Image: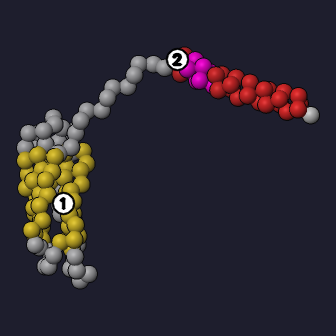
Amino acid sequence: MRPTRRRTRVLLAASVIAVGLAVPVGVQAANGASAGPAPAAPEPAGSECRTTVEGSRVVAYCHNPYPSTDLVQLHTECGRWWDIDADGAAVAVEPGRTVRLDDRCWKEVATAWVSHRPGPA
C-alpha cells in the first residue's frame, strides 16, 4: 500500500509542475505573437484643487497646470437634514489658470468636494 501512495504523490507533483511551466510559456507566446506597438501613456489632465471649509462656507481654488481644459464642479453637503445640499455649476479651467469656487450652507457643512471631467478641446 505504501508504494502506491508514493507513486500517486509523485505523479500529482509532476503534473502540477508541468501545468505551472506550460501555462506561462503559452501565454507569453500568444502575447508576443499578437502584440503590436505599445499604446501611448495617457496625457496627464485635471486641476489641482484645495478646498477649505470655515463654518458654513466652502471655498475651493483649482489650478490647471496641464495643457488641456478641465471642467470642475463644487459639491456641498450640508450637515442639517433640512439644509439643501448643492452642486455648483461646472466651470472651465483653462491651461495655466486658477478659478475660485464657493458655496455655503445655512448652518454647518458636512462635506465638500470637487469633481473633474475633460473640458472642450
Tell me the magenta residue range: 23-30
Q: Is residue 91 magenta?
A: no
From this view, report whether residue 101 is shown above or below residue 17: below
Helix, strand or loop at mark 2? helix
Picture residue at 9% right of the left edge, 53% below the top: 61
Q: Nearer the viewer, mark 1 or mark 2?
A: 2
Quarter of the figure with residue 68? top left
Residue 54 image label: none
Q: Hey, what amino acid is under mark 1?
A: Leu
Picture residue at 24% right of the left edge, 45% below the top: 118
Q: Is residue 62 visible?
A: yes
Q: Label 2: which residue?
A: 32
Q: Label 1: which residue?
A: 74
Residue 58, horizontal then vertical, whole percent: 12, 65
Q: Is residue 92 visible?
A: no
Q: Hey, what amino acid is under mark 2?
A: Gly
Q: Is residue 29 magenta?
A: yes
The quadrant of the rendering that contains the C terminus is top left
Q: Judge the density around disc 1: few (<14), some (14-19), many (≥20) Cα neighbours within 10 Å.
A: many
Residue 91, horizontal then vertical, whole percent: 15, 54
Q: Is residue 102 left or right of residue 32?
A: left
